[in-house]
Image: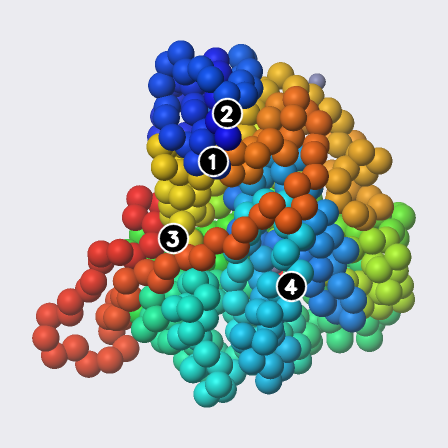
């Protein structure tokens, strides 16, 4: 099957130029002028960009006594409708569960995906079995990223001992550790104190997770990763304190990546003071929304390159599910949606306002993460030989976001009423048209798992925690994401 994208302007992380694209059997086979033959898609007046990659989603995830309500079908459909052509979900083993058994469940759920996907493996418990299985997860399953929760005490949280061990294992295997950086012990104490004082509403959720909680944990994760001799990726970076820790480490030659969410960039903590309980509870996520000072820091980080990726942490719960926390904010399922709106919201608030260039937009929505996760240029690129995951972006197409017309399965949208300018005319997932002249088509089961090779391991810690007798040899080849 041949498709030609005609008359558009290609925008990549590096270049902007006019050219047509030929796609054969899901792969870009030619980029050049005046191409013809096959099905033609008219991109006149549009930017032709690598499809978005959302590296942080939780689809049909068992969490806080329930399951997140978008599954691999509705979640990926929502993504495609907004120009996102790949998602990476987190496989969460239960305590003492084999990592491979947990993966079987994720394999099952993901068969319905409308676009390609991959998994991160979460380290939810620790022991010799996990240490052993990590090797086959990397080598046999093509999963080169391991997530660590420093929060959710008594549930998902790992302590420093476990984290340091796991990071060293990652270093040896050529895997990249990911961290949810919030000090779970401090959060637990603050939650108990707030409840004791009678603060049980959604606004107390934000009080229980101040920016310091995130700054401390981010700094600790970075230092521990440095001692383990492994790069580290901080998910949902939401505060200046966390950003500062990342910036400082990068200046010191430590490879750290930071991932702000579109929610934290565009929504603030005044939402938690809304008089309507449902309104506030629907916005409860961790870390919580912050004030303008933090938002400005995140935008600055994207422009300056000290933060590299914009994600969503898409974890959608219905109003009914949120109401589990009436009378006790700690029981409100944590999570918000964003998969469908990430690209239009970032374009509108970033490119349209001049805060980001179009090339930076492509870098932070697609190319950077493809490099960091070691799947570039199969993903995140418009190059001959790359997968034809492409969005034909109409910068003049507008809409007002509303739950009534969204693809997501839940009954509200945290961006309700926001006006966006810049939307897909076409979205292609490996050459298959999923958004056709603005209209979403279901491609259930089309999505394939994307395996990712390990990185060449970085075996020398950059820090001095052990005696150095000879000049230290620092391996720098093959480390993820050179140039990111
Ligand atoms: N934060 C959320 O808000 N939801 C899912 C998990 C997380 O860390
Ligand atoms: Zn998290
Ligand atoms: Zn998450
Ligand atoms: Zn308008």
Label located before the other in sequence (2 or 3)? 2
Q: Position of residue 451 (x, y in %)?
A: 45, 57
Local crowd size for mark 4, using a 10 Å CA cut-off: few (<14), some (14–19), many (≥20): few
Q: Which of 70 and 411 is in front in this view?
A: 70
Answer yes or no: do the residues labelled 4 and 1 have beta carbons within 8 Å?
no
Tell me how the rendering is colored: rainbow
Q: How far apart are marks 2 and 1 (CA)?
A: 9 Å
36 or 320: nearer the viewer? 36
- Crowding at label 3, few (<14), some or many (≥20) Cα neighbours within 10 Å? many
Mark in the foreground, 4 or 3: 4
Query: For the point 43% across and 82% down, which residue is it?
Result: 132
SS label for mark 2: strand
Pointer 2: what residue? 3
In space, the residues marked 4 and 1 are separated at their CA atoms by 26 Å
Q: Distance between the residues labelled 2 and 3?
A: 27 Å
- Quick check: 47 above or below 189? above
Q: What is the distance, in whole Å, between disc 4 and disc 3 at their CAs?
A: 24 Å
Secondary-structure class at tag 4:
helix
The tag earlier along the polypeptide, 2 or 1, is: 2
**Is there a contact, CB below 8 Å, between mark 2 and mark 4?**
no
What element does badge 3 sit on?
Answer: loop
Residue at disc 1, secondary structure: loop
Q: In which quarter of the image is residue 347?
A: top right
Q: Mark 3 points at which residue?
A: 374
Q: Residue 108 carries which label?
A: 4
Residue picked out by circle 1: 25
Q: Earlier in the sequence, mark 2 or mark 4?
A: 2
Q: Which residue is drawn at 11% across and 70% down?
A: 471
Say few, some or many: other residues with alpha carbon within 10 Å of mark 1 (under 14 / 14 to 19 / 20 or more). some
> For the point 58% across and 66% down, which residue is it?
91
Q: Residue 427 appears at what percent x and percent y?
A: 59, 31
């Amino acid at each position: 099957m041949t498709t030609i994208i005609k008359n558009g302007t290609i925008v990549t992380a590096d270049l902007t130029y006019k050219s047509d694209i030929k796609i054969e059997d899901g792969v870009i086979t030619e980029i050049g002028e005046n191409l013809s033959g096959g099905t033609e898609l008219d991109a006149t007046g549009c930017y032709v960009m690598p499809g978005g990659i959302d590296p942080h989603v939780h689809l049909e995830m068992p969490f806080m006594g329930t399951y997140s309500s978008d599954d691999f079908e509705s979640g990926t459909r929502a993504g495609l409708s907004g120009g996102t052509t790949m998602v990476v979900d987190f496989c969460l083993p239960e305590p003492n569960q084999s990592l491979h058994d947990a993966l079987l469940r994720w394999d099952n759920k993901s068969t319905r995906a409308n676009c390609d996907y991959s998994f991160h493996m979460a380290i939810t418990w620790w022991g010799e079995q996990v240490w052993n299985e990590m090797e086959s997860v990397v080598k046999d399953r093509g999963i080169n990223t391991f997530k660590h929760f420093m929060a959710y005490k008594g549930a998902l949280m790992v302590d420093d001992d476990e984290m340091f061990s796991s990071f060293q294992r990652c270093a040896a295997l050529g895997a990249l550790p990911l961290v949810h950086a919030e000090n779970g012990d401090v959060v637990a104490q603050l939650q108990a104190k707030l409840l004791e004082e009678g603060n049980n509403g959604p606004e107390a959720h934000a009080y229980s997770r101040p920016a310091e909680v995130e700054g401390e944990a981010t700094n600790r994760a970075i230092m521990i990763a440095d001692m383990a001799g492994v790069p580290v990726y901080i998910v949902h970076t939401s505060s200046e304190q966390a950003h500062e820790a990342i910036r400082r480490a990068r200046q010191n030659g430590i490879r750290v990546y930071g991932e702000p969410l579109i929610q934290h960039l565009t929504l603030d903590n005044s939402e938690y003071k809304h008089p309507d309980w449902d309104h506030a509870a629907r916005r409860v996520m961790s870390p919580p929304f912050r004030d303008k000072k933090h938002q400005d820091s995140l935008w600055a980080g994207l422009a300056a390159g000290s933060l590299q990726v914009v994600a969503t942490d898409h974890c959608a719960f219905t109003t009914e599910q949120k109401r589990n926390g009436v009378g006790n904010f700690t029981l409100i399922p944590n999570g918000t949606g964003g998969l469908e709106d990430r690209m239009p919201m970032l374009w509108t608030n970033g490119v349209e306002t001049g805060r980001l260039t179009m090339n930076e937009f492509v870098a932070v929505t697609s190319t950077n993460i493809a490099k960091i996760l070691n799947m570039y240029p199969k993903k995140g690129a418009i190059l001959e030989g790359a997968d034809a995951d492409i969005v034909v972006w109409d910068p003049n197409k507008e809409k007002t976001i509303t739950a009534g017309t969204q693809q997501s399965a839940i009954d509200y949208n945290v961006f309700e009423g926001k006006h966006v300018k810049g939307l897909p005319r076409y979205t292609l997932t490996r050459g298959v048209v999923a958004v056709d002249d603005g209209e979403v088509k279901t491609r259930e089961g089309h999505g394939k798992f994307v395996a990712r090779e390990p990185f060449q391991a970085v075996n020398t810690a950059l820090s001095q925690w052990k005696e150095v007798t000879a000049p230290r040899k620092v391996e720098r080849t093959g480390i993820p994401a050179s140039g990111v």
